Amino acid sequence: MNTRSHYDVAIIGAGMSGLAAGIRLAHFGKKVCIFERHNAVGGLNSFYSLEGRKFDVGLHALTNFVRKGVKGTPLTKLLRQLRIDRDEFALCEQKQSRVAFGPAGETSLRFTNDFAVFESEVARQFPTQIDGFRRLVERIKTYDDVSLEIAPISARSVVRGCLNDPLLEDMLFCPVMYYGSAQEHDMEFGQFVIMFKALFLEGFARPLQGVRVILRVLLEKYRQAGGERRMKCGVRKIIGRAGRADAIVLDTGEEIQATHVISSIGAPETERLVGVPPAGTELAAGRLTFVETISILNQQPAALGWGSDTIVFFNDSPRFDYACPTAPVDLRSGVICIPNNFDYGPNQALPEGIFRVTCLARYDRWAALPDDVYHNEKSRWYADVQRSARRFLPALSDGTLSSATVATDMFTPRTITKFTGHIGGAIYGAPVKHRQGRTPLENVYLCGTDQGFLGIIGAMLSGISMANYHILQKS
Amino acid sequence: MTKEDCKQVVLDIIADIAPDEDLTNVKPEVRLRDQLQLDSMDFLDIVMELRKRHGIEVPEAEYQQLASLDSCAEYLTPKFNALAAKS
């Protein structure tokens, strides 16, 4: 055996979950290597530079934020497990966010990192629903959402058991779905609970410098623990024999042997590395994907009257339809993020204004376009997406906004597939999750989006849990 | 190694695993879980840090021996001393 390329654990993908799994395993003395096809870490939550500016992808806000001293929540578990001091993340809290429904956002529920604000908004806008809402919250608080062995139930049916106003029901589902659901129309209740806690009972925060701060901390921990990392070095095949992975084959053709393989790239994507499954038996890939527009402004959004909202989840229609649209983009609903509107403290601010809008999109309407058409479609939809979102913010004239805009960018489902390898640009992976991370090969485990803990804190906890459960507890 | 030394070893590990816990008044006879916020993930880490730092093995069936500082000392001190005698 070539000892140089034998590892206790090979991890596929250097996103949040792969890095977190790697830190745990390396810390406890395992010989670990992370293989990443791209030259940047982070996967879906990464960053890039364009004309001297740094852009975040993925992360609008770190969810699951709790203040110092609050224990037993995902953020604190994560910090302990990875031996991270919370000051290293330098988290700054959101100002306020909203769920805004109706053609011009006529019904609006504000929320902050103090849950009482959201509760009082529900009581004020939906007085007949508040008792049911409190029952729902109680059920959420006591639900064992991290169990690896719980039977799936429909979140819609649980919520309808507590509430009978479809508007409020949809207003609760909209943020929860946009920030993590891989399933159309409904969610598994455990997934709903994870996201409801992450968004409403806990909250939003962000480091001033964005997602790169978090990635830098993870990389440094991993390096200190002795983990290895090979970038621009994808895995193209897993060689299975007698129910076990025998080796992995890199894009370069090099074979690597590993006692265990942890794959963060998704369940159907991992299945394809093992071989072509018989027709009709393959795991279904997700259909939910997004476009996002990013506008860089030459002033702080507050100077334009957009200084209060951190995140706005919007929907203009009678019902909220979380599904893959038939059109390239569904303009009826979306998420606005203004990263300037976190409370960064005195004398700290992002140098430029940033205005991001995310909408549901359809992969195949983007994937097949020739390059020139693709670029034209991007410009066209960029304008439509912005116009749709601005209905839910304080009014601003077209002229004022366009003269304040100094740069724009946009990602599409095609971009997501290019940088994450997710089939169909599926942002949250496949609709069916694999809580225990098992695959048909006994020494190959899933972590990350298709294991089913959501959000970036969830992604890291997923890597931690799978490393603990399958490897550290058993050795 | 004395039982007091052994308690300190365990406290040092907990201090690294859970730096957000105040360990100044941990009562040795009371279950750790009842006075500190430690979950099963944290107990797994205590076991693994014992192995990593001191070469002490705690089989899964004996995790409950780590319930309190006193029970840790009863259970781990002989293990430490046996290890020291071997080297």
Image (cartoon, rainbow, N blue to C red):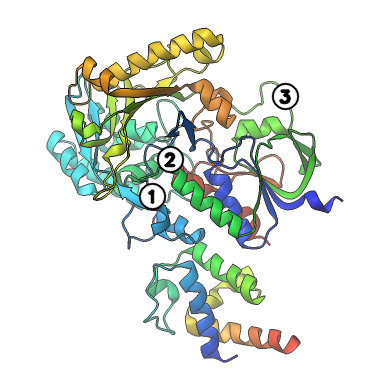
**Pair 1/2: label in front:** 2
Q: Secondary structure at mark 3?
A: loop
Q: For the residue marked with disc 3, what is the amino acid?
A: Pro
User: Residue A183, how many percent across, how many down?
Assistant: 46, 29
Cα separation between marks 1 and 2: 11 Å
The residue singled out by tag 1 in the image is A143
Query: Mark 1 or mark 3, which is nearer the start of the sequence?
Result: 1
Residues indicated by labels 1 and 2 sit on the same polypeptide chain: yes
Cα separation between marks 2 and 3: 30 Å
The residue singled out by tag 2 in the image is A191
Which residue is pictured at 60% across the width and 55% down the height?
A223
Q: Secondary structure at mark 2?
A: helix
Q: Which mark is residue A278?
A: 3
User: Residue B32, how many percent across, how many down?
Assistant: 44, 75
Query: Mark 2 or mark 1, which is nearer the start of the sequence?
Result: 1
Q: Residues within 10 Å of mark 3 (few under 14, many from 20)?
A: few
User: Residue A201, how many percent across, how many down?
Assistant: 30, 48
Query: Mark 3 or mark 2, which is nearer the start of the sequence?
Result: 2
Image quarter of residue A335: top left
Above or below, B27 against A399 in this view is: below
Q: For the residue marked with disc 2, what is the amino acid?
A: Gln
User: Along the horizontal axis of the image, is A87 left or right of B54?
Assistant: left
